[in-house]
Amino acid sequence: MSDDREHIPVLLKEVLAEFDPEKKKKFIDATLGFGGHTEELLKRESSVLSIDWDPEVVEKTKKRLSICCPEASLSVVNGNFRNLKEIARRNSFCPVDGVLFDLGISRWHYKKAERGFSFEDESLDMRISPEAKQTAAEIVNSYSLKELDELFSKLVQEKLAKPIAKTLVRARGLEPIKSGKKLADLIEQVYQNKHEKTVYHPATKVFLALRMEVNQELKSLEKGLAESLELLEKGGKTLVITFHSGEDRLVKLFGRKIKDRFNTKLVFPTDEEVANNRLARSAKLRVFEKL
């Protein structure tokens, strides 16, 4: 599979069913990625404003979409969806019929980006964009024991947060922790010492917490969600695909606050999709329809 198709769009049929795209409808894809959802909306003759914070991904996807959808009504912006309203107005793209947030990151980021998202011997960076203020290495090597413990326990409910934090503080006192492999090995050793087992790699949750902290994902999501609702036509929908409990909890609580003004719905991937794409197993689609 080539670089530009590394991310298989999750819940695609369900997204299209909710949006019911047709000619002259307008949608914002707030998380373009490699363009799976955007491409299908364009093929149905909708106009799309697509946003992604990763400049490298933007260039790859713009090139691909210009080839597969040369006549499409598409605008691609390198930006963060926390600035959704500003981006939409700057591009004269509001009001809209729908906004999509697909919160997963692509296989490409894990396998090809070489920014420390994986457990390999790569620089521990984890910035989606160069605009992010700090790297994962800076967090691991500068946060206090208490800050690391709270980051791992509160953000991703890591059951061994405190012993992992203690191990990292002790290890960095000998030499800085600079690579994903070094960090993953340290966490794996904690699990072995505690005789704990996990279905996934022991470092999975810690890496997720660091990625979220580096890119300030929850703060951006909260702001972007609120701004998306202001851009919707009556009957328009904001769709949010989540992949882990931290972000899904935020979206669910957000939905409770707006339930008097929006119809809400929760949709899961089919068994068939999960069988064909293991990344879909933890996905949830939350729908907010403007009354």
Image: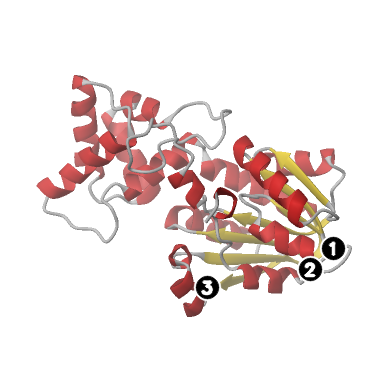
Left or right of 281? Residue 21 is right
At horizontal 49% and vertical 39% (from top left) the residue drawn is: 113
At horizontal 34% and vertical 27% (from top left) the residue drawn is: 143
- Residue type at numbered disc 3: Pro
Query: Helix, strand or loop at disc 1?
Result: loop
Residue 157 position within the rendered picture, expressed as x and y whole percent measured from the top left: 33, 51
Left or right of 238? Residue 272 is left
- Label 3 CA crowd tier, 10 Å (few <14, some 14–19, many 20+): some
The image quadrant of residue 144 is: top left
Residue underneath mark 2: 21
57 over 41 or under it: above or below: above
At horizontal 32% and vertical 31% (from top left) the residue drawn is: 179
Query: Helix, strand or loop at disc 2?
Result: loop
138 over 237 or under it: above or below: above
Query: What number is the disc on residue 269?
Result: 3
Nearer-the-camera pick, 190 or 109 = 109
Left or right of 70? Residue 172 is left
- Mark 1 in CB contact with mark 2 (< 8 angstroms): yes
Query: Helix, strand or loop at disc 3?
Result: loop
CA distance for labels 2 and 3: 20 Å
Nearer-the-camera pick, 112 or 264 = 112
Query: What number is the disc on residue 251?
Result: none
- Residue type at numbered disc 2: Pro
CA distance for labels 1 and 2: 6 Å
Residue underneath mark 1: 25
- Residue type at numbered disc 1: Lys
